[in-house]
Image (tube, helix red, strand yellow):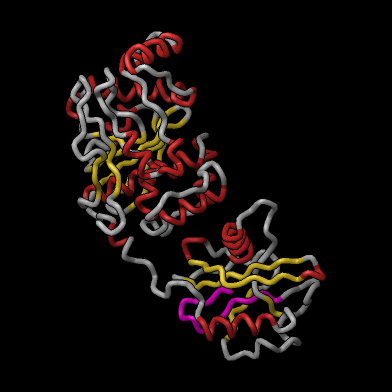
């Protein structure tokens, strides 16, 4: 059920094939096997009409189960937040006035169900917040350059918010990034900064795991400095056991070259020490969302949920655009999303809306702070 911006019209398609050929019906489609309802609703809405997730906020209003037809229907309702140029996929689209007799089965599909659904909205409301969520957009500092970086295969994904405008690029090295964005205000990166050289040196990882307990496994154990600069993986394992008394995971092995690249850059460029700062996207998303996001960002549902959160700050961000960009850059779409999340958080940091964990970080032996910069908890912003 899609209402226009003024909320005085409803969107219908006029069916050109059975069932209900020639009758008006709400737009919709089938839920794919294993697909979450909200994801299917936004996907079908876009395919049928061209209306994007950033154009509307849907609410799950009701369900119907037709046992004799082995059919289950989920009903979603929302109000457009901006004018949209409709794009028909198959059935012609029409905006109809609310003074129609939606119970007229000679005009409308569904044996009276359309009338029932409209009456439910009239009587009890849609459940959708009726105010466009602009307070989040206003939190973006439009007079700064904020950088968010995430590692990817073959380089780094860089998301920049420059005076309110988002730009996403792929760069080969940290040096290339700082050369292009030398005038940044805040720079957050999803990579380890500050390497322990003994058991006494405490990193922020345990603090971060407490914030996202349900997804704590996304925070990998950090090797010691001696392991990062070991000649090979076997030697790195031995050094880590000798220094920290434990091994690290194969996933950690995969990012060790990136850790070494970033640490080497910082050792060679003192002006960026404790200026380029570590963060963690899942912790930042939890702070932006008010709670831990349980969906996996490697799956479509997880991507859609995170894009929806980022839409509060970047309303024109589109999941389909990001997926196409991931193909172009030959990276994972979650690399893009993580970089954007850190760019948003870096922008908030410019406004004093972030904290560090821990609040009094230790220094590693080279003077790097062992900390993460994340958004303030909900209620403290």
Residue 142 position, x and y percent, is 25, 55
Looking at the image, residue 306 lies above or below residue 157: below
x 34%, y 39%: residue: 208
Q: How many marks?
A: 0
Residue 76 position, x and y percent, is 58, 69
Residue 292 position, x and y percent, is 42, 49
x 54%, y 39%: residue: 327
Q: Quadrant of residue 276?
A: top left
In the visual, does 94 lie left or right of 336?
Answer: right
In the visual, does 289 lie left or right of 63?
Answer: left
x 74%, y 86%: residue: 105
Does residue 273 appear in this view? no
Looking at the image, residue 81 lies above or below residue 102: above
- Which residue is at the front of the view, 95 or 65? 65
- In reply to whether residue 269 is colored magenta, the answer given is no
Give, as a single range, the part of the protein colored magenta. Answer: 1-14
x 82%, y 70%: residue: 68
């Amino acid at each position: 059920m899609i209402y226009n911006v003024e909320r005085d019209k409803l969107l219908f398609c006029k069916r050109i094939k059975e069932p209900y050929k020639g009758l008006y019906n709400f737009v919709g489609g089938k839920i794919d096997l294993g697909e979450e309802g909200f994801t299917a609703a936004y996907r079908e809405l876009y395919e049928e009409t061209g209306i994007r997730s950033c154009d509307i906020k849907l609410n799950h209003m009701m369900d119907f189960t037709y046992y004799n037809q082995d059919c289950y229907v989920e009903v979603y309702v929302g109000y457009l937040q901006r004018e949209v140029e409709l794009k028909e996929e198959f059935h012609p689209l029409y905006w109809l006035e609310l003074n129609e007799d939606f119970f007229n089965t000679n005009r409308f599909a569904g044996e009276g169900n359309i009338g029932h659904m409209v009456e439910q909205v009239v009587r009890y409301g849609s459940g959708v917040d009726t105010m466009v969520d602009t307070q989040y957009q206003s939190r973006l500092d439009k007079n700064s350059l904020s950088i968010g970086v995430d590692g990817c295969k073959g380089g780094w994904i860089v998301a920049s918010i420059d005076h309110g405008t988002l730009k996403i690029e792929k760069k080969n090295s940290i040096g290339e990034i700082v050369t292009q964005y030398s005038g940044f205000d805040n720079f957050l990166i999803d990579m380890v900064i500050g390497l322990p050289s003994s058991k006494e040196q405490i990193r922020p990882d345990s603090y971060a795991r407490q914030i996202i307990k349900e997804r704590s496994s996304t925070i990998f154990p950090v090797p010691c400095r001696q392991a990062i600069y070991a000649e090979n993986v076997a030697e790195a394992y031995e050094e880590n056991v000798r220094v920290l008394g434990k091994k690290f995971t194969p996933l950690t092995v995969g990012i060790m070259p990136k850790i070494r690249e970033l640490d080497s850059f910082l050792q060679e460029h003192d002006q960026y020490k404790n200026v380029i700062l570590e963060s963690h996207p899942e912790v930042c998303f939890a702070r932006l969302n008010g709670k831990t996001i349980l969906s996996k960002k490697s799956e479509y549902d997880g991507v859609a949920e995170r894009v929806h959160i980022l839409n509060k700050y970047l309303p024109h961000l589109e999941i389909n655009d990001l997926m196409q960009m991931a193909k172009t850059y030959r990276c994972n779409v979650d690399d893009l999303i993580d970089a954007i999340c850190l760019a948003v958080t870096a922008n908030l940091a410019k406004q004093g809306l972030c904290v560090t964990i821990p609040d009094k970080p230790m220094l590693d032996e080279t003077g790097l702070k062992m900390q993460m910069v994340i958004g303030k908890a909900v209620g403290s912003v």
